[in-house]
Amino acid sequence: MIERRYYGEFGGAYIPEILVSTFEQLVMAFQAAKANPAFRQEYEDLMSTYSCRPTPLTFAENLTKYFAGPRIYIKREDLNHTGAHKINNVMGQGLLVKRMGKGRVIAETGAGQHGVATATMAAKFGFDCTIYMGEVDVARQRPNVFWMERLGARVIPVRDGSRTLKDAINEAFRDWAANMDDTHYVLGTACGAHPFPEMVTYFQSIIGREARRQVMDREGRLPTRVYACVGGGSNALGIFSGFLDDPVELVGVEAGGKGLETGRHASRLASKDGSVGVAQGYKTYFLQNDDGQMKETHSVAAGLDYIGVSPILAALRAAEKVRFEATTDQEVLDAFSLTLKKEGLIPALESSHAFAQVFKETKDLGKDDIILINLSGRGDKDIFTVADAFSDPQWNQFIQKKAEEYGA
Ligand SMILES: *Cc1c(COP(=O)(O)O)cnc(C)c1O
């Protein structure tokens, strides 16, 4: 009997019959690994020697002065190998794949960041690797496709439907069902059927454990609030899990896109547009029409541009443990610029959502308060989007042309 873990009314495992035994095997491998202290040690050793863990905690002295309010600290997930928290999850799954004795991994990717992280993991562990990517995204994300291929992965452009992320997910599931004996599907966030939400959160919780210890070492007390951006929810759950039993306010920040009132956003929990449904193997809030058709979402940050959200976050909201907000593309670009100029940090546009929300709320807090922001990734990858947004078409064309030359 397959385990179908729920979080309140959310989660579960709504999977085709053919994949049941594969999910059972994964659940068992994960439970056994989790119960074994040597596994956690192996994982932490790997992350400290391969991906710069523990990542530092940076005091944002200039931003703190600028707002003349709470003390602002930044958890530096941007310093991970491949530039974001995603590596925490894929390396953990890589260790499980090894334990299950499989030799092939597949993944789907939209913006390409999860694809690059998975291809990196596959190279390191010696796995065969196939990445599914919508044809539209392949064209939009040439530099990432270039690196995935150089890392030895096969990138398959998906030509069905809207030729974006959701079509790539369907294709990856088809591959998995056909090749499950030797193949593991590396899901990139804390979504999907059980055990993925729990498993991805387990690996990402390394962020919160470190961050809690680091704030305590530095300040001798807990932060007042912790902020993280929310796409699927993995970096948010990673940092929040360090503080779930503490009297700390947790704030998840979704993509407000052009504004919640326009309908052009990717806010499932902070807007009124999300509704509970079942899709892609799990039950959560989705941006869907009355007949269950998924809506078009929009965000300046590709990594937040997703129709669903982690069932664990949906449950934490229902339990009033996490507050959800949304920031618009424009607020995000302003926060991005301010963070560069004041701290010399280049946050990913995804992470800049958390910064934008903090900047809106500093006036509510006093100088004794401490704020912790999860800087989920670095913004180098956003060069085209940022050049576009700041109306620098010449520079953008130059970079695009160069990228195409290298990619060709
Ligand atoms: C992918 C990505 C996200 C969104 O994913 P979550 O699972 O919500 O964390 C956020 N930040 C960065 C830098 C990313 O690459």
Image: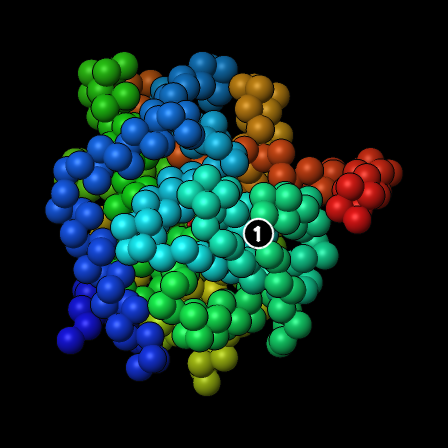
Q: Nearer the viewer, residue 241 or 159?
A: 159
Does residue 317 show up? no
Is 344 located above or below residue 99 in the figure?
A: above
Q: Is residue 55 left or right of residue 33?
A: right
| Residue found at x 82% / y 43% | 405
Is 279 located above or below residue 402 in the figure?
A: below
Does residue 383 show up? yes
| Residue found at x 23% / y 67% | 24
Q: Which residue is mark 1?
A: 153
| Residue found at x 52% / y 34% | 83
Q: Where is residue 304 drawn, in percent x and y?
A: 50, 52
Under tag 1, what secondary structure? loop
Q: Nearer the viewer, residue 252 or 78?
A: 78
Q: Nearer the viewer, residue 314 or 363?
A: 314
Q: Where is residue 228 drawn, in percent x and y?
A: 39, 40
Which amino acid does the dot numbered 1 rest on? Ala
